[in-house]
Image (cartoon, rainbow, N blue to C red):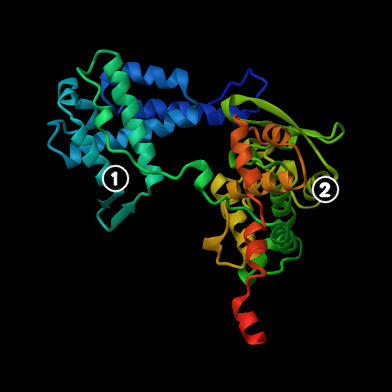
Amino acid sequence: MAGKELKIHNKSDKPNNIVEKEARIFQECEDIERQLPSFLRGFFLYLKGNVLPMSRLAYLHDLKFFFNYLVNETGLTDAEEPRKITLAEMQEIKAIDINLYLDYCRKYKVETEKNIYIYENNNKTLARKKSSVSVMFKHLYRDGLLPENITDGFDPIRVPKAGEREIKALQDDEVMIMLDAVSTGNGLTGHQHAYWEKTKKRDKAILMLFLTYGLRLSELQQLNVSSFNFSRGEFKIYRKRGKESIMPLNMSVTATLEDYLANERPAEDTLADEHRDALFLSLQGKRMTERQIRELVKKYTAIALKTTQHGGYSPHKLRATAATSLIGRGNSIYDVAALLDHEQVTTTQLYARHKQNVKRDLVKDMEWEKERTEK
């Protein structure tokens, strides 16, 4: 498939960009599968039928990394490339070999002709890599391809439970600072200000959609002009698992979007066919990438947080901001869970436990130094 252009003949109700993205994920999965041993075919079918496309792709990337490790970093195989590793060689792998692999994943280097890259992974990433390998070994054992299930001997990896993690979200006053920045240009550098003059209405519309609906990055990036029905006051998004969801428009979002569409977005006849329906466009007239949107969000949240752009928040933290703000306004946890497409309401309850100012309120009257000087 290398070098061949992907052509979409879409007979479904989904927009072309959604169908094309799904097709590219499917193609990338198949490309990786061809690089891996043939005895994994049953496992590939299991992934295809039981996990989401992006999860399937993540599993395959992890397995490709694991089999490359076996070839390049160990003496466990005589193969010169992953797809030539034999089942007999896999049957000789022990739990200790996997634990050594996980230790390798903590920090490793990759050398190119010009550079040496050092990669360091945290426990969350290590736990994902362990999970990918564990699921594969369990499946091969269940299919009778391995004589024993070695996964019980894999070392545990401690990761914080959901309730132990500090939820990072903007407070209401920080949201106001961010919206002021995107509306007026306050806080931007001279270089940023020059770009802001051309994209301020687009940028504000992006932030308003994140803050109001808690959209996932992929959901916002895939939005089209045709996704919106302003006469009915609603728009359509595509969730995980290919699920469609109709979202109501409020007055603020409607006004912001109509301002952008009428006064800043390029005319359709100036755009290439593949980008003509895309809602958010780059200065080159192409659909914005997830990376471009992520950098935009980090830029404006950094101003709100009074930090460097590196310290700005990701779009997912604007999703957390929407959740905590909605719950803080007294909305039902179940209603918020439905809006944000949480599979389990326990996920939403984590945001309910997060009281934005509770730590500040606890310490504001504990001004020891102030009390000392006043005495």
Circle 1 residue: 105
Q: Determine the residue positioned at 60% across, 49% down.
A: 317
Label 1: state its secondary structure: helix
Q: Amino acid at mark 2?
A: Ser
Query: Left or right: where does residue 316 sit relative to residue 246?
Result: left
**How many residues crowd around disc 2 within 10 Å: few (fewer than 14), some, or many (20 or more)?**
few
Q: Determine the residue positioned at 71% across, 51% down.
A: 202
Q: Determine the residue positioned at 61% across, 46% down.
A: 288
Label 2: state its secondary structure: helix
Does 138 sit above or below residue 249? above
Q: Depth check: give the residue in front, 83 or 154.
A: 154
Does 222 sit above or below residue 118? above
Distance, label 1 to label 2, CA atoms, is 47 Å
Does 52 sit above or below residue 284? above
Which disc number belongs to residue 252?
A: 2
Circle count: 2
Query: Left or right: where does residue 46 sit relative to residue 80?
Result: right
The C terminus: image quadrant: bottom right
Q: Determine the residue positioned at 19% across, 25% down.
A: 90
Residue 55 seen: yes
The N terminus: image quadrant: top left
Quarter of the image where one finds residue 17: top right
Pick whichever of labels 1 and 2 is earlier in the sequence: 1
Residue 142 in the image, given as x and y percentages of width and height: 30, 15
Q: Amino acid at mark 1?
A: Cys
Residue 98 in the image, given as x and y percentages of width and height: 23, 35
Query: Left or right: where does residue 199 sit relative to residue 155?
Result: right
Closer to viewer: mark 1 or mark 2: 1
Q: Are marks 1 and 2 in contact (CB under 8 Å)?
A: no
Residue 5 seen: no
Which disc number belongs to residue 248?
A: none
> Please, which residue is most extreme toward the top here?
144
